[in-house]
Image (cartoon, grey):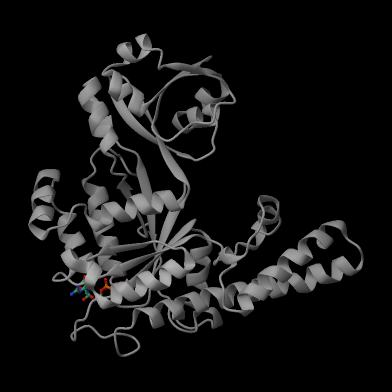
Amino acid sequence: SLTAGIVGLPNVGKSTLFNAITKAGALAANYPFATIDPNVGVVEVPDARLDKLTELVEPKKTVPTAFEFTDIAGIVKGASKGEGLGNKFLSHIREVDAICQVVRCFEDENITHVSGSVNPIDDIEVINLELILADMESVEKRLQRVGKMAKQKDKEALIEEPILVKLKDALEKEKPARSVDLSEDELKVIKGLHLLTIKPMLYVANVSEEEVADAANNKYVQQVREFADAEGAQVITICAKIEEEISELDDEEKAMFLEELGIEESGLDQLIRASYDLLGLATYFTAGVQEVRAWTFRKGMKAPQCAGVIHSDFERGFIRAETVAYEDLVAAGSMAAAKEAGKVRLEGKEYVVQDGDVMLFRFNV
Ligand code: GDP
Protein backbone atom coordinates (compact mmCIF):
# COMPACT_ATOMS: atom_id res chain seq x y z
CA SER A 1 0.00 0.00 0.00
CA LEU A 2 1.01 3.61 -0.45
CA THR A 3 2.65 5.49 2.36
CA ALA A 4 3.72 9.05 3.19
CA GLY A 5 7.04 9.52 4.96
CA ILE A 6 7.51 12.07 7.73
CA VAL A 7 10.86 13.85 7.55
CA GLY A 8 12.41 16.92 9.15
CA LEU A 9 15.49 18.12 11.03
CA PRO A 10 15.99 16.99 14.65
CA ASN A 11 13.84 18.73 17.30
CA VAL A 12 11.15 20.00 14.95
CA GLY A 13 8.39 17.77 16.41
CA LYS A 14 8.45 14.68 14.19
CA SER A 15 8.29 12.15 17.02
CA THR A 16 5.56 14.11 18.73
CA LEU A 17 3.50 14.09 15.54
CA PHE A 18 4.24 10.43 14.89
CA ASN A 19 3.14 9.57 18.42
CA ALA A 20 -0.14 11.31 17.72
CA ILE A 21 -0.51 9.23 14.58
CA THR A 22 0.13 5.89 16.23
CA LYS A 23 -2.11 6.69 19.18
CA ALA A 24 -4.94 7.82 16.91
CA GLY A 25 -4.48 4.62 14.90
CA ALA A 26 -4.50 2.41 17.98
CA LEU A 27 -7.81 3.96 19.02
CA ALA A 28 -9.33 3.10 15.67
CA ALA A 29 -10.80 -0.14 16.91
CA ASN A 30 -12.24 -1.06 13.53
CA TYR A 31 -8.97 -2.38 12.29
CA PRO A 32 -7.02 -5.36 13.45
CA PHE A 33 -4.01 -3.41 12.24
CA ALA A 34 -1.18 -5.83 12.07
CA THR A 35 1.73 -3.52 11.50
CA ILE A 36 4.87 -4.96 12.93
CA ASP A 37 7.04 -2.11 11.75
CA PRO A 38 7.27 0.40 14.63
CA ASN A 39 8.03 3.13 12.11
CA VAL A 40 4.66 2.72 10.43
CA GLY A 41 1.52 4.31 11.84
CA VAL A 42 -1.92 3.54 10.44
CA VAL A 43 -4.73 6.08 10.71
CA GLU A 44 -8.32 6.21 9.57
CA VAL A 45 -9.12 8.64 6.78
CA PRO A 46 -11.73 11.08 8.11
CA ASP A 47 -14.67 11.33 5.71
CA ALA A 48 -17.97 13.02 6.54
CA ARG A 49 -19.64 11.15 3.66
CA LEU A 50 -19.19 7.91 5.54
CA ASP A 51 -21.18 9.27 8.49
CA LYS A 52 -23.95 10.39 6.16
CA LEU A 53 -24.10 6.97 4.47
CA THR A 54 -24.27 5.35 7.88
CA GLU A 55 -27.29 7.51 8.77
CA LEU A 56 -28.92 6.55 5.50
CA VAL A 57 -28.32 2.81 5.49
CA GLU A 58 -28.14 2.10 9.25
CA PRO A 59 -25.70 -0.79 8.86
CA LYS A 60 -24.50 -3.07 11.65
CA LYS A 61 -21.00 -1.74 11.21
CA THR A 62 -19.17 1.19 9.59
CA VAL A 63 -15.56 0.90 8.51
CA PRO A 64 -13.46 3.85 7.34
CA THR A 65 -10.53 3.40 5.02
CA ALA A 66 -6.98 3.63 6.33
CA PHE A 67 -3.76 5.38 5.48
CA GLU A 68 -0.13 4.78 6.45
CA PHE A 69 2.56 7.16 7.60
CA THR A 70 6.19 6.16 7.95
CA ASP A 71 8.47 7.86 10.45
CA ILE A 72 11.83 8.65 8.89
CA ALA A 73 14.13 9.94 11.60
CA GLY A 74 17.66 11.10 11.23
CA ILE A 75 18.20 13.65 8.51
CA VAL A 76 20.95 16.16 9.22
CA LYS A 77 23.07 18.42 7.10
CA GLY A 78 25.47 16.20 5.14
CA ALA A 79 23.16 13.15 5.05
CA SER A 80 23.80 12.69 1.34
CA LYS A 81 27.51 12.42 2.18
CA GLY A 82 26.81 9.84 4.87
CA GLU A 83 26.58 12.17 7.90
CA GLY A 84 24.29 11.05 10.72
CA LEU A 85 22.23 8.10 9.62
CA GLY A 86 22.95 9.37 6.11
CA ASN A 87 22.44 6.71 3.53
CA LYS A 88 20.16 4.63 5.70
CA PHE A 89 17.89 7.60 6.04
CA LEU A 90 17.87 8.21 2.31
CA SER A 91 17.07 4.58 1.55
CA HIS A 92 14.01 4.85 3.83
CA ILE A 93 12.81 7.83 1.84
CA ARG A 94 13.18 5.82 -1.36
CA GLU A 95 10.50 3.47 -0.09
CA VAL A 96 7.79 6.05 0.54
CA ASP A 97 5.44 7.48 -2.08
CA ALA A 98 5.11 11.04 -0.78
CA ILE A 99 7.00 13.20 1.71
CA CYS A 100 5.60 15.26 4.59
CA GLN A 101 8.30 17.64 5.73
CA VAL A 102 7.84 18.87 9.30
CA VAL A 103 9.15 22.41 9.79
CA ARG A 104 9.69 24.02 13.17
CA CYS A 105 7.64 27.19 13.48
CA PHE A 106 7.48 27.31 17.30
CA GLU A 107 9.87 29.14 19.58
CA ASP A 108 10.87 27.48 22.81
CA GLU A 109 14.15 28.43 24.42
CA ASN A 110 14.30 25.08 26.22
CA ILE A 111 14.40 23.16 22.99
CA THR A 112 17.59 23.62 21.05
CA HIS A 113 17.42 24.24 17.39
CA VAL A 114 20.11 22.39 15.46
CA SER A 115 21.32 25.55 13.76
CA GLY A 116 20.87 27.87 16.74
CA SER A 117 17.67 29.73 15.92
CA VAL A 118 14.24 29.11 14.45
CA ASN A 119 14.46 29.66 10.72
CA PRO A 120 12.03 27.54 8.74
CA ILE A 121 13.31 28.46 5.29
CA ASP A 122 16.91 27.59 6.18
CA ASP A 123 15.65 24.29 7.59
CA ILE A 124 13.68 23.46 4.47
CA GLU A 125 16.64 24.31 2.29
CA VAL A 126 18.97 22.07 4.30
CA ILE A 127 16.69 19.08 3.83
CA ASN A 128 15.78 19.76 0.23
CA LEU A 129 19.43 20.19 -0.67
CA GLU A 130 20.36 16.81 0.84
CA LEU A 131 17.67 15.17 -1.25
CA ILE A 132 18.82 17.02 -4.36
CA LEU A 133 22.45 16.02 -3.79
CA ALA A 134 21.49 12.38 -3.39
CA ASP A 135 19.51 12.52 -6.64
CA MET A 136 22.35 14.27 -8.41
CA GLU A 137 24.60 11.36 -7.53
CA SER A 138 22.07 8.82 -8.87
CA VAL A 139 21.54 10.77 -12.09
CA GLU A 140 25.24 11.34 -12.75
CA LYS A 141 26.10 7.70 -12.18
CA ARG A 142 23.35 6.60 -14.51
CA LEU A 143 24.28 9.20 -17.09
CA GLN A 144 27.83 7.89 -17.28
CA ARG A 145 26.61 4.41 -18.17
CA VAL A 146 23.80 5.49 -20.44
CA GLY A 147 26.06 8.01 -22.20
CA LYS A 148 28.47 5.24 -23.18
CA MET A 149 25.65 3.04 -24.43
CA ALA A 150 24.14 5.94 -26.37
CA LYS A 151 27.47 6.42 -28.18
CA GLN A 152 27.11 2.83 -29.38
CA LYS A 153 23.65 3.73 -30.67
CA ASP A 154 21.84 1.63 -28.08
CA LYS A 155 18.18 2.43 -28.74
CA GLU A 156 17.00 2.63 -25.15
CA ALA A 157 19.99 4.63 -24.07
CA LEU A 158 19.32 7.15 -26.82
CA ILE A 159 15.87 7.69 -25.33
CA GLU A 160 17.05 7.84 -21.74
CA GLU A 161 20.05 10.13 -22.14
CA PRO A 162 18.21 13.39 -22.93
CA ILE A 163 15.83 12.78 -20.00
CA LEU A 164 18.77 12.37 -17.65
CA VAL A 165 20.35 15.54 -19.01
CA LYS A 166 17.14 17.47 -18.30
CA LEU A 167 17.11 16.13 -14.75
CA LYS A 168 20.77 16.92 -14.21
CA ASP A 169 20.26 20.51 -15.39
CA ALA A 170 17.44 21.04 -12.91
CA LEU A 171 19.26 19.40 -9.99
CA GLU A 172 22.36 21.50 -10.67
CA LYS A 173 20.19 24.57 -10.27
CA GLU A 174 19.05 23.08 -6.93
CA LYS A 175 15.60 22.39 -8.30
CA PRO A 176 13.83 19.11 -7.43
CA ALA A 177 13.26 16.47 -10.11
CA ARG A 178 9.49 16.96 -9.70
CA SER A 179 9.90 20.47 -11.15
CA VAL A 180 11.02 18.98 -14.48
CA ASP A 181 8.20 18.63 -16.98
CA LEU A 182 8.26 14.94 -17.93
CA SER A 183 5.70 12.91 -19.88
CA GLU A 184 4.22 9.67 -18.55
CA ASP A 185 6.55 7.74 -20.87
CA GLU A 186 9.61 9.67 -19.75
CA LEU A 187 8.69 9.07 -16.13
CA LYS A 188 8.53 5.34 -16.81
CA VAL A 189 12.04 5.37 -18.30
CA ILE A 190 13.57 6.85 -15.14
CA LYS A 191 11.36 5.05 -12.62
CA GLY A 192 14.14 2.61 -11.77
CA LEU A 193 16.31 5.44 -10.49
CA HIS A 194 13.96 5.92 -7.52
CA LEU A 195 14.67 9.62 -7.31
CA LEU A 196 13.86 11.26 -3.99
CA THR A 197 12.94 14.70 -5.25
CA ILE A 198 10.46 13.34 -7.78
CA LYS A 199 8.12 12.35 -4.96
CA PRO A 200 5.36 14.82 -4.15
CA MET A 201 6.02 16.84 -0.99
CA LEU A 202 3.96 18.86 1.43
CA TYR A 203 5.10 21.00 4.33
CA VAL A 204 3.85 20.62 7.88
CA ALA A 205 4.32 23.87 9.82
CA ASN A 206 4.55 22.97 13.52
CA VAL A 207 3.43 25.92 15.64
CA SER A 208 3.15 26.42 19.38
CA GLU A 209 0.05 25.73 21.48
CA GLU A 210 -0.55 29.47 21.88
CA GLU A 211 -0.47 30.22 18.18
CA VAL A 212 -2.29 27.33 16.61
CA ALA A 213 -5.71 29.03 16.48
CA ASP A 214 -4.23 32.08 14.77
CA ALA A 215 -1.47 30.34 12.81
CA ALA A 216 -2.08 32.34 9.64
CA ASN A 217 -0.55 35.36 11.39
CA ASN A 218 2.55 33.53 12.55
CA LYS A 219 5.53 34.98 10.69
CA TYR A 220 7.26 31.61 10.35
CA VAL A 221 4.14 30.02 8.90
CA GLN A 222 3.90 32.91 6.44
CA GLN A 223 7.47 32.29 5.33
CA VAL A 224 6.80 28.59 4.82
CA ARG A 225 3.66 29.40 2.85
CA GLU A 226 5.49 31.77 0.55
CA PHE A 227 8.19 29.18 -0.08
CA ALA A 228 5.67 26.41 -0.70
CA ASP A 229 3.54 28.57 -3.01
CA ALA A 230 6.54 29.16 -5.24
CA GLU A 231 6.89 25.37 -5.56
CA GLY A 232 3.17 24.77 -5.91
CA ALA A 233 3.28 22.76 -2.68
CA GLN A 234 0.73 22.64 0.11
CA VAL A 235 1.21 23.68 3.76
CA ILE A 236 -0.63 22.14 6.70
CA THR A 237 -0.41 23.96 10.03
CA ILE A 238 -0.47 21.90 13.20
CA CYS A 239 0.63 21.97 16.81
CA ALA A 240 2.18 18.53 17.22
CA LYS A 241 1.91 18.72 21.01
CA ILE A 242 -1.82 19.36 20.87
CA GLU A 243 -2.28 16.63 18.28
CA GLU A 244 -0.67 14.24 20.72
CA GLU A 245 -3.22 15.23 23.36
CA ILE A 246 -6.13 15.03 20.93
CA SER A 247 -5.11 11.56 19.82
CA GLU A 248 -6.02 10.22 23.28
CA LEU A 249 -9.58 11.57 23.16
CA ASP A 250 -12.73 9.96 21.85
CA ASP A 251 -14.70 11.66 19.07
CA GLU A 252 -16.96 13.65 21.34
CA GLU A 253 -14.18 14.91 23.60
CA LYS A 254 -12.15 15.71 20.54
CA ALA A 255 -14.91 17.87 19.06
CA MET A 256 -15.26 19.80 22.33
CA PHE A 257 -11.52 20.30 22.67
CA LEU A 258 -11.19 21.59 19.12
CA GLU A 259 -14.02 24.04 19.67
CA GLU A 260 -12.34 25.35 22.82
CA LEU A 261 -9.15 25.88 20.87
CA GLY A 262 -10.99 27.57 18.03
CA ILE A 263 -9.90 25.03 15.41
CA GLU A 264 -12.34 23.54 12.93
CA GLU A 265 -10.52 20.36 12.04
CA SER A 266 -7.59 18.76 13.81
CA GLY A 267 -4.24 19.28 12.13
CA LEU A 268 -3.74 15.54 11.91
CA ASP A 269 -7.04 15.06 10.09
CA GLN A 270 -6.03 17.80 7.64
CA LEU A 271 -2.66 16.16 7.17
CA ILE A 272 -4.21 12.75 6.51
CA ARG A 273 -6.53 14.15 3.86
CA ALA A 274 -3.81 16.26 2.22
CA SER A 275 -1.41 13.29 2.07
CA TYR A 276 -4.15 11.13 0.59
CA ASP A 277 -4.70 13.74 -2.15
CA LEU A 278 -0.99 14.13 -2.71
CA LEU A 279 -0.76 10.44 -3.50
CA GLY A 280 -3.56 10.65 -6.02
CA LEU A 281 -5.85 8.53 -3.87
CA ALA A 282 -9.63 8.61 -3.80
CA THR A 283 -12.44 6.78 -1.99
CA TYR A 284 -15.36 4.68 -3.11
CA PHE A 285 -17.97 3.17 -0.82
CA THR A 286 -19.85 -0.06 -0.39
CA ALA A 287 -23.12 0.37 1.47
CA GLY A 288 -24.90 -2.78 2.59
CA VAL A 289 -27.01 -3.39 5.67
CA GLN A 290 -24.22 -5.46 7.18
CA GLU A 291 -21.53 -2.94 6.58
CA VAL A 292 -20.97 0.54 5.19
CA ARG A 293 -17.37 0.88 4.23
CA ALA A 294 -14.90 3.23 2.55
CA TRP A 295 -12.21 1.84 0.21
CA THR A 296 -9.11 3.49 -1.15
CA PHE A 297 -8.19 3.40 -4.82
CA ARG A 298 -5.83 5.27 -7.08
CA LYS A 299 -7.49 7.89 -9.27
CA GLY A 300 -7.85 6.49 -12.79
CA MET A 301 -8.44 2.88 -11.70
CA LYS A 302 -11.21 0.99 -13.51
CA ALA A 303 -14.09 -0.90 -11.91
CA PRO A 304 -12.47 -4.39 -11.90
CA GLN A 305 -9.27 -3.09 -10.30
CA CYS A 306 -11.32 -1.27 -7.69
CA ALA A 307 -13.24 -4.48 -6.99
CA GLY A 308 -9.83 -6.09 -6.52
CA VAL A 309 -9.14 -3.74 -3.62
CA ILE A 310 -11.78 -5.71 -1.69
CA HIS A 311 -10.72 -9.15 -2.86
CA SER A 312 -8.75 -10.51 -5.81
CA ASP A 313 -11.68 -12.86 -6.60
CA PHE A 314 -13.85 -9.79 -7.19
CA GLU A 315 -11.41 -8.58 -9.81
CA ARG A 316 -10.95 -11.94 -11.53
CA GLY A 317 -14.67 -12.71 -11.74
CA PHE A 318 -15.83 -9.13 -12.32
CA ILE A 319 -19.05 -8.86 -14.36
CA ARG A 320 -20.34 -5.36 -13.66
CA ALA A 321 -20.86 -2.82 -10.93
CA GLU A 322 -24.09 -1.17 -9.86
CA THR A 323 -22.91 2.37 -9.30
CA VAL A 324 -24.46 5.51 -7.87
CA ALA A 325 -22.69 8.80 -7.12
CA TYR A 326 -22.66 9.71 -3.43
CA GLU A 327 -24.50 13.00 -4.06
CA ASP A 328 -27.21 11.26 -6.09
CA LEU A 329 -27.75 8.65 -3.41
CA VAL A 330 -28.00 11.24 -0.66
CA ALA A 331 -30.34 13.40 -2.76
CA ALA A 332 -32.60 10.40 -3.42
CA GLY A 333 -32.59 9.38 0.24
CA SER A 334 -32.28 5.63 -0.25
CA MET A 335 -30.86 3.08 -2.66
CA ALA A 336 -34.37 2.11 -3.77
CA ALA A 337 -35.31 5.74 -4.46
CA ALA A 338 -32.05 6.29 -6.36
CA LYS A 339 -32.87 3.27 -8.53
CA GLU A 340 -36.34 4.59 -9.21
CA ALA A 341 -34.89 7.94 -10.19
CA GLY A 342 -32.62 6.17 -12.67
CA LYS A 343 -29.47 7.23 -10.82
CA VAL A 344 -28.05 3.74 -10.38
CA ARG A 345 -25.93 2.84 -13.39
CA LEU A 346 -24.68 -0.55 -14.53
CA GLU A 347 -21.00 -0.04 -15.23
CA GLY A 348 -18.70 -2.49 -17.01
CA LYS A 349 -14.99 -3.34 -17.19
CA GLU A 350 -13.93 -0.04 -18.75
CA TYR A 351 -15.61 2.23 -16.22
CA VAL A 352 -13.19 4.63 -14.52
CA VAL A 353 -14.33 4.80 -10.90
CA GLN A 354 -14.95 8.29 -9.48
CA ASP A 355 -14.30 9.57 -5.97
CA GLY A 356 -17.51 9.11 -3.96
CA ASP A 357 -19.01 6.34 -6.08
CA VAL A 358 -21.14 3.91 -4.09
CA MET A 359 -20.67 0.50 -5.65
CA LEU A 360 -22.08 -2.99 -5.61
CA PHE A 361 -19.96 -5.48 -7.53
CA ARG A 362 -21.40 -8.42 -9.43
CA PHE A 363 -18.93 -11.19 -10.06
CA ASN A 364 -18.54 -14.87 -10.94
CA VAL A 365 -16.91 -17.12 -8.41
P1 GDP B 1 11.96 15.39 16.56
O1 GDP B 1 13.40 15.37 16.93
O2 GDP B 1 11.74 16.16 15.30
O3 GDP B 1 11.33 14.06 16.55
O4 GDP B 1 11.25 16.30 17.67
P2 GDP B 1 10.37 15.87 18.94
O5 GDP B 1 9.02 15.47 18.52
O6 GDP B 1 11.14 14.95 19.80
O7 GDP B 1 10.26 17.29 19.64
C1 GDP B 1 11.37 17.97 20.14
C2 GDP B 1 10.94 18.78 21.34
O8 GDP B 1 10.03 19.79 20.90
C3 GDP B 1 10.19 17.95 22.37
O9 GDP B 1 10.59 18.41 23.66
C4 GDP B 1 8.74 18.29 22.12
O10 GDP B 1 7.97 18.19 23.29
C5 GDP B 1 8.82 19.71 21.62
N1 GDP B 1 7.72 20.03 20.72
C6 GDP B 1 7.28 19.31 19.65
N2 GDP B 1 6.20 19.90 19.09
C7 GDP B 1 5.97 21.00 19.83
C8 GDP B 1 4.98 22.02 19.77
O11 GDP B 1 4.09 22.03 18.92
N3 GDP B 1 5.08 23.03 20.71
C9 GDP B 1 6.07 23.04 21.66
N4 GDP B 1 6.11 24.03 22.56
N5 GDP B 1 6.97 22.08 21.76
C10 GDP B 1 6.93 21.08 20.86
Q: Please indicate, yes or no, whether residue 144 appears anywhere in the rendered image.
A: yes
Could you tell me if residue 35 is visible in this image? Answer: no
Horizontal side, residue 139 vs residue 273: left or right: right
For this orientation, the residue located farthest to the right is: 152
- Residue at 18% across, 67% down: 214
Query: Along the line of sight, which residue is nearer the eye, 35 or 208?
Result: 208
Where residue 155 sits, quadrant-wise, is bottom right
356, 268: nearer the viewer: 356
Q: For this rendering, which residue is in front, 229 or 334? A: 229
Snapshot quadrant of residue 296: top left
The spot of residue 28 in percent (x, y) is 24, 43
Above-or-below relation of 107 to 182: below
Spot occupied by residue 344 in the image (x, y as percentages of width and height): 41, 16
Task: Give the left or right position of residue 348, taking residue 72 as reference.
Answer: right
Look at the picture and state if 89 lies above or below 18.
below
Q: Residue at x 19, y 82 (%)?
A: 108
Q: Quadrant of ligand 1?
A: bottom left
Q: Position of residue 295 (x, y in %)?
A: 39, 35
- Give the number of marks: 0
Q: Residue at x 42, y 67 (%)?
A: 229
- In the rendered view, tell whether residue 19 sits above or below residue 85: above
Task: Single out the residue that lies furthest toward the top.
Answer: 340
Depth check: give the residue in front, 17 or 26.
Answer: 17
Is residue 365 shown above or below 270? above
Looking at this rendering, what residue extends furthest in the bottom direction?
Answer: 116
| Left or right relative to 249: residue 180 | right
